[in-house]
Amino acid sequence: EAVTPESLIERHTSADGTVNVEALGADLADNAEAGTVDPAFVTRVFESLPEEDREAAANAFFDNLSTTPGGGVAPWHDDYASLALTPAGMDVILAVGEYAPERLAADEIVYGFASQNRDAVHSGDPAASATTSAFLDALADSPEAQQSLATFMEPLYSDEREGIASTPEGRELQDRIERI
């Protein structure tokens, strides 16, 4: 179905002109998990929303990403992490996160991302290193969250250090982690 940002918003707007931001955020989350929405579309949706509805819609997006309990420490946001394994998926998350930066920096989001991406980063996967760098950039206004992500992603063993250093993206990420 070819949906425009305006028609998506219209789909979730009542007769009195009120946007159901919870339903809109849930719809965006479902489509993001299915890989049928891109960052440009998300940006246009949020630009088309009334300014006072943007944060609530972003919060609803994060609320509606599928989660599963795990690890005993914090919930793992499996679909969030799976979506973030691709540069395009991370761009969708970052596009939404601009309107809810506190949710983007939440401990369970940072931990969920790190737990799902740590092995890929340490094995030298350039896409995982690039998405981690993008996430660190997005957390610039939250030094605590940036520190948490850097701590989670820091290589501890020599084989992890070698893996992360095997690509230019990994070396850049390793330098950033050390600086943080």
Image: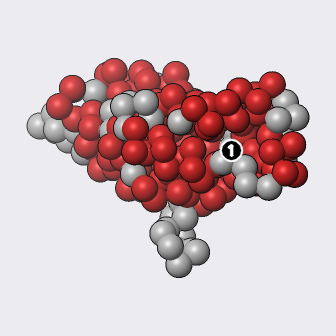
Find numbered disc 1 in the image and state the secondary structure of the residue it sits on: loop
Residue placed most toward the observer, 168 or 77: 168
Query: Where on the picture, by quarter, is residue 6?
Result: top left
Q: Is residue 89 above or below residue 77?
A: above
Q: Identify the residue shown where x is 43% and y is 45%.
A: 145
Residue placed most toward the observer, 40 or 78: 78
Q: Identify the residue shown where x is 45% and y is 59%.
A: 108
Q: Is residue 125 visible?
A: no
Q: Is residue 180 above or below residue 49?
A: below
Query: Where on the picture, by quarter, is residue 105?
Result: top left
Residue 71 pos. (x, y %): 58, 75
Does 130 sit left or right of 125 as displayed? left
Q: Identify the residue shown where x is 21% and y is 26%.
A: 51
Badge 1 amino acid: Leu
Q: Which residue is mark 1?
A: 85
Residue 135 pos. (x, y %): 54, 36
**Counting other residues with Cα less than 10 Å from the Cα at mark 1, is it few (<14), some (14-19), or many (20 or more)?**
many
Residue 102 pos. (x, y %): 33, 43
Does 110 sit left or right of 120 as displayed? left
